[in-house]
Image: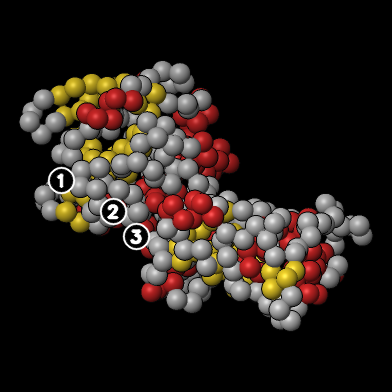
Amino acid sequence: MKAEASAHEWPTKVEWGLIGSCTNSSYEDLARAASIVKQAVAAGITPKAEFGINPGSEQVRYTADRDGILSDFEKMGTKIFTNACGPCIGQWDREGAEKQEKNTIVHSFNRNFSKRADGNPNTHAFVTSPEMVAALAIAGDLTFNPITDTLTNEKGEAIKLSAPAGDELPTKGFAVEDNGYQAPAEDGSNVEVKVAADSSRLQLLDNFPTWDGQNITDAKLLIKVKGKCTTDHISMAGPWLKYRGHLDNISNNMLIGAVNFFNDKTNDVKNQLTGAYGEVPATQRAYKAAGVSSIVVGDHNYGEGSSREHAAMEPRHLGVKAVLVKSFARIHETNLKKQGMLALTFANESDYDKIQEDDTFNFVDLASFSPEKSLTLEICHSNGTKENIQLNHTYNASQIEWFKAGSALNLIKLMEN
């Protein structure tokens, strides 16, 4: 790490160490990290970086509290966050993040895409184990090697940390007072969900429209994405998550982090109706208002990262009909299917290069949509030429019914009725 940090000019001062969220936050994870913290406290070592943890669940938090693990952390000034995603998706108030300064943090989360943790594109987030997070937060130095290096305590003594230790499972078993489960009403027929009409954070959802049985024609290109496009690029987290209960408002972040192939910019695409360039969500809203269909074109492993459904719900809500890519991340592909979207891949990846900024698209055989049968897409270029390409898919018969019904949820409702 020392050599890599020097070669890449990464900041070696660690500002924050973070443990937890849904990944690397088990009882054993916290116990092993706490064993490092206990050593530092006993030796009189003051941590050089801020330190915080997110227990993996209320059961883990309650049991760790009962067994004194949280107390061990608190003795070193560790911040105990809630049992939720927290800093992993930017749900914290990180002081100074708005300054956009170059800095380093270390965490045990499984995602470290640019801007994810705190909205700062200049934050370098390094992923490591919970015990290494603890050691690096205490040392405050990215190049610290706990196997060979020492720390200096308040008396000026050189202290070497011992290897971490922790029970895989609590010896007294797990415990919890409130696991967060609320049983539904036995009869929900008279239950009314009331949401204020002017709420910006909650919105009752309408059913997505069903497929009309016709080919999708005259669809415009919303964006041809260049390179990596994670669910954070498609639907950013952080401050946006306050709108996660309001689909229309959170849709204003749709694909704002994706790079436009044609100008290498983010959140800047051509509106084919006006010829002007503008934000991706605004352009798509203009298409929807005009009754114009659209498609999104992407690169390899499109939709990797968090499994958030908003990344599929937002384009569906705003009127995108299909997502056509070289390859999908598996969970995002499934999420698109559940929302009644067409999730398709190029039969020949080189056809990605045929897509031009002013293209219009026609699906010519959607009526015969069936498992293991490719679809044909007609590309109409602005110079008047046309060409057909083949699109593959992984829909089974049940998933095709999701598409026809408008979404998996729509189909469930239709079957209940």
Is residue 417 placed above or below 68 in the rendered structure?
above
For disc 2, the marked residue is 266
In the rendered image, residue 259, in percent from the top left (x then y), is placed at: 30, 48
For disc 1, the marked residue is 272
In the rendered image, residue 7, in percent from the top left (x then y), is placed at: 44, 52
Cα–Cα span, label 3 and label 2: 14 Å
Residue plotted at (23% across, 37% down): 219
Cα–Cα span, label 1 and label 2: 17 Å
What's the amino acid at mark 3?
Asn
Residue 69 falls left or right of residue 356: right
- Within-10-Å neighbours for mark 3: few <14, some 14–19, many 20+: many
What's the amino acid at mark 1?
Gln
Q: Quadrant of the C terminus?
A: top right
Does the rendering let one see residue 285? no
Residue 130 falls left or right of residue 167: left
Mark drawn on residue 252:
3
